[in-house]
Image: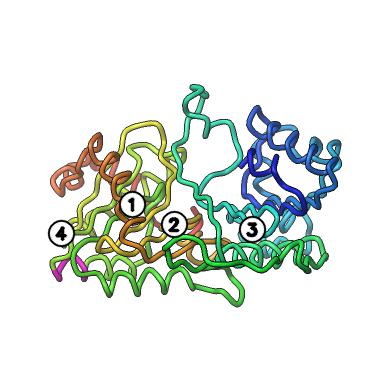
Amino acid sequence: MLAAIGEARKTIGLATYIFDNDKSGLQFVEALRQAVARGVQVRVLIDAAGTHYSVPSIIHALHRARVPVGRFLPTMAPWRLMSMNLRLHRKIMVVDGRVGFTGGMNLREGNLVAQNPRHPVRDLHFRLEGPVVAQLQEAFATDWLFAAKETLAGADWFPPLEAVGGVMARAIPDGPDEDFEKLRWTIFAALSCARDSVKIVTPYFLPESTLVSALNLAALRGVRVEILLPARSNLPYVDWASRAMWWQVLEFGCRIWLCPPPFDHSKLMLVDGQWSLVGSGNWDTRSLRLNFEFNLECYCPELAKSLDKIVQSKLQGARQVTQEEVDGRSVPVKLRDGVTRLLSPFL
């Protein structure tokens, strides 16, 4: 991403949930500052809640670098308290309208796992070319118009794009607006079509009852359903709530695997070695009903095969959860998990 910013000549659009004021974040600020100095039109959009993950906020550094920056739905404005739960969870960057990046990765030092950060995070992010990049740009431009009241248009932002590569892909923007529940229905469709295998990698697993039923129906048809979760996420109370509902999928034949540290923030779904879903959405109510998310569905056996290798590498070090283990929790732990589960729509 930094290399792409360094090569930008006309435009850069960057939207993210978290943009930390740390070593990694400041690298991006400097790269964006240099782009502005070269005459590149730069626009940065950060979720207002995501600006509070580091103190002081990265907003001040971006202002000093003369980088145009907007905040999505400021949460402390009295007239916006009703929308405080509607967060921009998308991760999108488009350079010159031709090269796009999306996935699950926030801009923070924890992603630099090789440098042994204090809180390491594994993640998946993707570099894109071809017509699908225009769909990333459209999502960014729509969010920027909403937050900054500026229209981004013209060939600098939306150049003509020719097909690149052999992957058929389309964007799935999702949010509590005209795109409401598009991601949820896409997942339902994929589960209903599955014949052999479904592999899900997600950091947070709190699906609503209808999605649980769809997973179980797939397993009852003989589909091998495997769900990979972090053994310990960055949100313990989400782990507790998730554990309280594992029995609902285990008893019908779905398999749950716990991956060892570092915390895995990847979001990935593979079906029958043909279809892949990647992006920012988690398997929880917040992502599927409240957040503004951005995902891609891709049809390509070659891509699915390469992503399956990533899943298999995660499975090698993972531990399978058994029904006996879930049932064998102590009464206090079951009570804690169950009470937290009741709060899952808010987690």
Of 43 and 133, the residue lying toward us:
133
- Magenta stretch? 217-221
Which label belongs to residue 278? 2
Residue carrying label 3? 98
What separation in Å lies between label 3 and label 2 (alpha carbons)?
A: 19 Å
**Amino acid on which disc 1 is placed:** Gly
- In this rendering, the answer to whether 281 lies above or below 3 is below
Pair 3/1: label in front: 3
| Labels 4 & 1 near each other (Cβ < 8 A) | no
Which of disc 3 and disc 4 is earlier in sequence? Answer: 3
Which label belongs to residue 253? 4
Pair 2/1: label in front: 2
**Amino acid on which disc 3 is placed:** Arg
**Amino acid on which disc 4 is placed:** Gly
What separation in Å lies between label 2 and label 1 (alpha carbons)?
A: 30 Å
Of 33 and 174, the residue lying toward us:
33
Which of disc 1 and disc 3 is earlier in sequence? Answer: 3
Q: Which residue is at a point 62% across and 44% down the rendered structure image?
A: 18
Secondary structure mostly seen in magenta is helix
Q: Is residue 330 left or right of residue 307?
A: left
Q: Which residue is at a point 34% across and 47% down the rendered structure image?
A: 337
Say if the magenta span includes residue 245. Answer: no
**What secondary structure is marked by label 3?**
loop
| Labels 4 & 2 near each other (Cβ < 8 A) | no
